Amino acid sequence: MLDTMLCLEAFARAAGTHADLRVQNLALASEPAFVSVVNRFSLTLTETVTCSPEGAYVTSWGYRLGTIDDVDSAAARLAYLLAALPA
């Protein structure tokens, strides 16, 4: 069974490696659990990411960022979407 909390913690760590991104909220006790990430230079550039039961990272508007097998690529895709500089 997929451990959503561990998956989201890993995503939060990976997103935090990007210079322009900041993890705003890691809500593991909510339903569904999520991580909220914001561009440090534009607070309007923010996104909420959940982890599907199949192991995919998904944005609040349904865009699939990637899977738990390659969390760094999924975080990099979010960084691109939020107009952040590469890690």
Image (cartoon, rainbow, N blue to C red):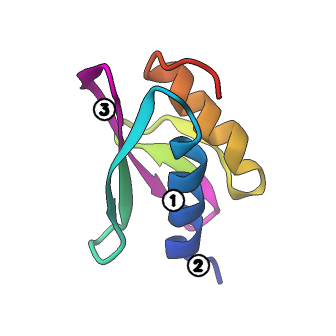
Please give the range of residues in magenta.
Answer: 37-56
Task: Work out how far the residue at label 3 is from the one at label 1, CA to CA, in angstroms.
Answer: 17 Å
Q: Is tag 3's residue or tag 2's residue first in the polypeptide sequence?
A: 2
Residue on which the image places disc 2: 3
Amino acid found under the numbered disc labelled 3: Thr
Q: Give the secondary structure at mark 1.
A: strand
Q: Check the image and report above or below for 8 versus 79.
A: below
Which image quarter: residue 77?
top right
Name the residue at the front extreme.
Answer: 19
- Residue 52 is situated, as x and y percent measured from the top left of the image, at 53, 60
Report the front residue among 56 and 83: 83
- Residue 10 is situated, as x and y percent measured from the top left of the image, at 60, 61
Task: Work out how far the residue at label 1 is from the one at label 2, CA to CA, in angstroms.
Answer: 9 Å
Name the residue at the right extreme.
Answer: 69
Residue on which the image places disc 1: 51
Report the front residue among 58 and 29: 29
